[in-house]
Image (cartoon, helix red, strand yellow):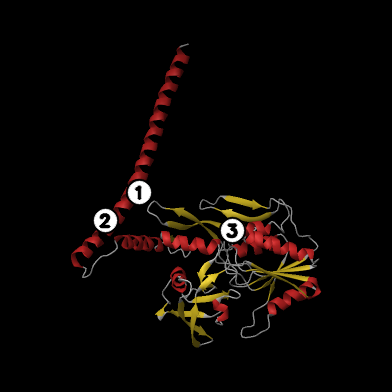
Amino acid sequence: MNFEKKNSIYKAVMIIIVTALVTFLTTTVGMYNYYSRTTKNTQLDSKVKQIRAYLDELYFGEIKEEEKLIESAIKGYIDGLEDEYTEYLTKEEYEELMINVNGDYVGIGIYMVQDKSGNTIILLPIEDSPAAEAGLKTGDIITKINGEDCKEMDLSSVSNKVKGEEGTTVELEIQRDGELLNKTIERKTIELNHVKTEVLDNNIGYIQILSFDNECKIEFEEKLNELMKKEIKSLIIDVRDNGGGIVSEAVEISEMFVPKGKTIMIEVNKDGGENVIKSKKDAIVNSDVNIVVLANEHSASAAEILIGALKDNNIAKIVGTKTYGKGVMQGIVPVSFGGVLKLTIQEFHTPNGEAINKKGIEPDIKVEEEKYSDKDVQLNKAIEMCR
């Protein structure tokens, strides 16, 4: 009995000690986190206040828009991450982004990308757009906009300067094959079509996806069903020069080909945790349909999700050149003062677990594009494989 009493007292003391230790550790961690956040905030506030003091004391000029200074400071802070896909967008820039993703906009009708040297390159003029009518071509480099050098501009700034009110014009200086061309182009409302189709000889269906923007999946499914009603025996899916778009659109298009239960992609979060995305539907394309996917160095992001899903599941052969290698996804986080953060939040891998980011996807059959030639050797190879 005496032993049991001592044992009971011992347990009680140990519980008190453990509770005290846990409380101490919790408090310590909480204080550390608070101190770390407070210290970082204090450092940032202190530096910004110091710069502001110098401006107030020495700057020879009028500070007209305090809000613009603050937003520029935020943009610079985010730029320090050196992540090309993470950025702060003002309310106006975010609204502009949503217009581009969700539907029509006023502009000249081009898809653009920036290379690693900061050159703004035209990926594709939209069919029947002012850009197409003015003779702009894939590969053209925009060097000036209304006389302003755009070498140092980010892609968002270039896009905003090219766009404008309907009926107004924009002056572009274009570099093509070492020659400088000047184009005056009128801005118009651009109707975005995501998908183009036709039936080639020998009952080969051809379907081109220009971008994975909002409702691309609906348009793709309609066009695909039209092709299947024409009893195509082979299918060419062209995602060359497709810079991506909305991930869910690519996943839903992949489900039209990938059997139910098979992996489409793998999401990897910052802690290394994985979320395997599998097809939730039965494929609508018969397995006996021969499928070839055309890809190139400008096929990126959502386009690479589709390419990876069809390649790793042995549904299609990939023809062309290695893809761009944008294997990370961004999320939109609204902030209290009106803008949004577009943040890299995940990396995605192909069904076989291969990372894509900064690596790209190698084609099954490599076919280099023949520049300055009217022959589409990549498409010709895909047609040859479909016969």
Task: Tell me if mark 2 has few (under 14), some (14-19) or many (20+) residues whose alpha carbon lies within 10 angstroms of its own.
Answer: few
Q: How many marks?
A: 3
| Rendered image: mark on residue 37 | 1
Residue 216 occupies quadrant = bottom right
| First in residue order: circle 3 vs circle 2 | 2
Q: Secondary structure at mark 1?
A: helix
Q: Nearer the viewer, mark 3 or mark 1?
A: 3
Is residue 337 placed above or below 33 in the rendered structure?
below
Spatial separation of the CA atoms under disc 1 and disc 2: 14 Å
Image-based side of 364 in relation to 173, left or right:
right
Say what amino acid the circle numbered 1 marks. Arg
| Relative depth, front residue between 159 and 373 | 159
Does residue 146 lie above or below 164 as drawn? below
Reading the image, the residue beneath label 3 is 247
Q: Is residue 89 visible?
A: no
Q: Which callout, 3 or 1, points at the residue further toward the start of the chain?
A: 1
In the image, what residue type sits under mark 3? Val
Residue at the location (52% across, 64% down)?
Answer: 100
- Whether the residues at callouts 3 and 1 have beta carbons within 8 Å, the answer is no
The image shows residue 109 at horizontal and vertical percentages of 54, 73
| 3 vs 2, front mark | 3
User: Compared with residue 286, is residue 33 higher up or lower down, i.e. above or below?
Assistant: above
- The one nearer the camera, 308 or 18, is 308
Q: Where residue 247 appears, x then y in whole percent?
A: 59, 58
- Residue occupied by mark 2: 46
Point 54% across, 82% down: residue: 134
